[in-house]
Image: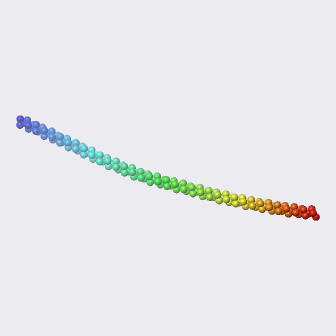
């Protein structure tokens, strides 16, 4: 009975040792998995931060492109306004020239009418003599 008890005790101790070894192996395995998960989490955070930085950079580039586009549109609008002013000045000059020409033509007509009246008076005077 003592020998059986000793064997039983020895068997239980061996099983307990085996369970302890297995538990240690399982703990080591889980610690390794936890370390891998931590490393993966750090990598994911790093990728997220890089993506956020890239998004900010792209937003800054978009803002710059919009500013350049707006500046370009403003420059084009200014150019169109300058061209329109030049065209308006040209037309105003043409209108003034046309007015001056019309006034000159009227003066010539009035002078011709006055000359015609003078000639008519001379003709009438000659006939009267």
Q: Is residue 102 left or right of residue 114?
A: left
Q: Where residue 50 sits in the image (x, y, percent)?
A: 38, 51
For the N terminus, the quadrant is top left
Q: Is residue 48 left or right of residue 79?
A: left
For the C terminus, the quadrant is bottom right
Q: Where residue 52 sits in the image (x, y, percent)?
A: 39, 51
In this view, the residue in front, 59 or 127, is 127
When the figure is inspected, residue 69 is found, relative to residue 11, above or below; the finding is below
In this view, the residue in front, 126 or 23, is 126
What residue is rendered at 77% in x and 60% in y?
106
Q: How is the image coloured?
A: rainbow
Q: Where residue 91 sits in the image (x, y, percent)?
A: 67, 57
What residue is rendered at 62% in x and 56% in y?
84
In this view, the residue in front, 47 or 59, is 59
What residue is rendered at 85% in x and 62% in y?
117
Q: Is residue 44 left or right of residue 110?
A: left
Q: Where residue 127 sits in the image (x, y, percent)?
A: 92, 62
What residue is rendered at 34% in x and 49% in y?
45
Picture quadrant of residue 82: bottom right
């Amino acid at each position: 009975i003592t020998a059986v008890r000793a064997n039983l005790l020895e068997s239980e101790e061996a099983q307990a040792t085996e369970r302890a070894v297995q538990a240690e192996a399982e703990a080591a395995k889980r610690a390794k998995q936890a370390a891998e998960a931590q490393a993966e989490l750090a990598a994911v955070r790093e990728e997220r931060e890089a993506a956020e930085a890239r998004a900010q950079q792209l937003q800054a580039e978009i803002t710059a492109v919009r500013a350049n586009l707006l500046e370009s549109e403003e420059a084009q609008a200014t150019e169109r306004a300058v061209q329109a002013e030049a065209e308006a000045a040209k037309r105003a000059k043409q209108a003034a020239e046309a007015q001056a020409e019309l006034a000159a033509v009227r003066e010539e007509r009035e002078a011709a009418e006055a000359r015609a009246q003078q000639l008519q008076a001379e003709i009438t005077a000659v006939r009267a003599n």
